[in-house]
Amino acid sequence: MTTTRLRRQYQYFAFISYSHTDAKVAEWLHRKLESYRLPNAVLRKSDGQLPRHVRPIFRDIADLSSGSLARTLREEIGQSQFLIVICSPDSAKSEWVEMEVSHFLTLRGHEFVIPVIIKGTPYAKDAVDECLPLSLLRTEVDLLGISFAGQSKEQVLLKTVSALLDIKYDSLYDRHRRRQRRQRMFAATVVTVMFVVVLTASLFSFIQWNRAEQRRAEAEQLLNYLLLDLHPKLKQFGRLDILESVAEKSREYIDYISTDVRDPIDAIQAISLRRNMAEVYQSVGKLENAEALHLKNISVLKKLEQIDPKMEIIHLLKGEEHQALASIRKTEGRFQDALHESLTAFSVFKSFVSVKSDARWRSAKASSEQRLSDAYYDLGMGKQAAWHINSAVSDFRRILHEHSAGDNSYKADLAYALVSKSRVEVKWGTTSRAYSVFVEASELFRQHLEEHPEDREVRASFANVVSDLAAMLKDMGRLEDALIYWDLAIDAERELVTFEPLNVRWHADLSETMMNKANALGRLGRTGEGFLLYEEVSRHQRKLIALQPKVARWRATYAWCRHNMAIEYARLGKNKGAIDLWNDAIATIEQLRKDGRAKREWLLDLCNMLDQRATITAENGNFEKAEQDIKASQAIRASLISDSNSSPDELSQMGLNQARKALLDYYRKDYSHAMVSIKAAEGYLRRAVKLDEANCEWRAHLAGTLRNSSVIHRAAGFPDKAKRAIDECIVILEKLRIRQPSDKKIRVDLSQAYNNQGNLYNDFGSIKSSVSAWEKSLTLDSDPAQREFLATRLGTLAYQYILLQDPGKSEMSARKALEVDAAPWIQINLGHALFLQDMREAAKAQYLNAMRKDGKILASISADFVDMENHGIHVRNAIQMLDELRGAALETNNEKQ
């Protein structure tokens, strides 16, 4: 028998269609059907295939005017297996009844329509007496229906039940009458034989049973109110404080909800209540309680599955429960467990959902596959993540195409899937493809919000997508555009936080967006604004950790914020503060790693933090500690990344790790190992650039590595290789400067590269070329953290202008250098410039000032005079100046003695 099996695919047994004039009959039939209980003999004979109750039945009680069928009623009709039509001449003329019948026939067919005739005649010759709606008259089969004429109400009810359950009316009627006779006979026997005893026992038993039933009914009623009515409203207004009270109140009643599986309908209703309560617990951060309820639901569903393995609704609910468990375990940082639950959920959906299934179930399968892709993404399994998300996106596109007409509720589903796809593209694909996918997702979210402006979940997702788009624009070199998008995202998220001040998710999203914006502000040289945002983010994350200490995401975001702050401190030359921040960030991720709650992405972030700390530690001379960080970073990466099948992002990270190892060897003056490491770094970064040519970050990393390569090869005595490296570095940075004119970091890097090029030309003896390179360096931004570096560049340039016989430019350059650093060697260069311009006394004053700071500087002055003569510059009265300086030095010594 197929009726029961089919019934369990639908929310309602039947939809009652009636005209307003027939409302009393419809109400009577509705009440009687839902209260009717099938005789035990019939249930036993069916071997559990029939339900005890014929419910729920849907009857619309709103007084709707005729017109287009409301979307809600269309959905209720679609979720009803049978259509009971209260037939009368009035209903035959009702446009509303006609639309309901017509819509049902397009979905299910005439075999699932049950006409109940209260007045009139079917297929009447006179139109005035016709009781069937026009759609039923057009069917090829004559529908005689169930008529009130010549029958009692009891007979009409039983015939309707027999039609709904596909059982013989005579058998049902016979069993019904037998049950009534037995009940009367039993009552008579009880009264006659054991009136007092049985009456007393029955009364006591009835009271106990009534109390239990009353308690269960009260529990269901209260839970329905708390979980289905109050909870969504409190969640909408962000009242998580009251939500926690709702959870505790619900807990008192949840134990009264039955886990009995003999009545599948009651069992499924209980599952729904437990699931809603689990959502309440999850909203307030009580993940263990939520997990326990989902596990109980899975246990009940397994029992139901054993009773009827072909009951599709059970398998679908089971899949959703495993999906909910996966979400909880991901939140806790248990990513391997989350993948296991996601795989279980998807296998369930895949087994029971086909291409011909209802769009709602196909959408559930696609959503499950999307979440499976996310689980693979969290574990760094790129091929699996890409395969499943492409399949999910295809399914959603197909569903959306089928429902393109009218109100569309699948746009947001496709947008969510596209967001997951773009994340996979960013990690394992190309920036340009990811960007186009992000743009499509944001447009779908925008369209959905136009149709459903009250949907805060989608509004939050839209803000996330806009923020991700901004990050993409940053990687593509469009920093100013990125800031515009981040401001849009922050405005949307601040609106959500204002409306729901206790919703931790909105706070977390806002924190991450502000952190990304702060990073971009640092790149633009607006460090002060960036620090204010970083401090605000740190405060937010500490609060979130205190509120929900088991949520791994809050700790990881806090660590990433500290890491970004450390980078800014390092740029400003505040190395101690930077190392303190990295220590805090690294300890936070290490603790997650120790607890087994750190996903792959966070571990790669940890590698980045270790590499950055190693660089600063090596600059401070602590080579042993720097080497420990580099080796720890390499070990973690080796466990996570396969060199033969790496994404551009992973290749870039491996390249930067090798570059930092090369710098460590350089600081130790182990140039041979440094050259090996820097060559490996170049190889990784060139592969990353080749795989994703639109990403400016990889090119900037390659340029930085080439500059380091130039420094290392110059120190190792390979000037030609050093020059090739710095020339290529400058070509890359110049192209990036054109694409990113507002990026201060690019300008600083290019300034340093030109300075390195000038040093090399100076080594070759090409004074004009070196001066040209240094002049270009000075026209660009200098890093405020390297003031001494700026003074050295200006002071060196001052001497080069002397050799080019341009003492005027030399004086100007030396004076600028002295504004930064009044070093003795810069003062003697200023003295040379003045001396060559015949400003003898002013020059002598500069020489004497330098000699007071450094008693041995006189030898350098003498050597410079000789060098100038060698370059064809005649220094008049040089010997006389040296004699006067020596005399001044002797007088100074005598005074000291």
Image (spheres, rainbow, N blue to C red):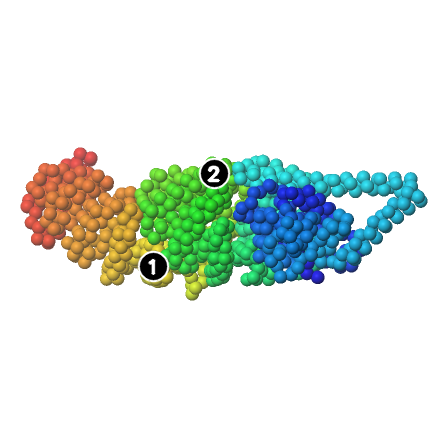
Residue 237 seen anywhere in this rendered image of the structure: yes
Label 1 vs label 2, nearer the camera: 2
- Residue 272: give x, y in percent of width and height: 64, 48
Q: Quadrant of the C terminus?
A: top left
Asked which quadrant contains residue 896, the reply is top left
Q: Quadrant of the N terminus?
A: bottom right
Asked which quadrant contains residue 248, the reply is top right
Observer-nearest of 769 and 187: 187
Contact between marks 1 and 2 (CB within 8 A): the answer is no
Report the residue at 43% width, 52% height from top.
Answer: 441
Residue ID for mark 1: 693
Farthest residue in the top direction?
Answer: 895
Report whether 704 appears left or right of 778.
right
Residue ID for mark 2: 497
Farthest residue in the front direction?
Answer: 126
Report the residue at 25% width, 49% height from top.
Answer: 751
Residue 311 seen anywhere in this rendered image of the structure: no
Observer-nearest of 835 and 441: 441
- Mark 1 and mark 2: Cα distance apart in space: 38 Å
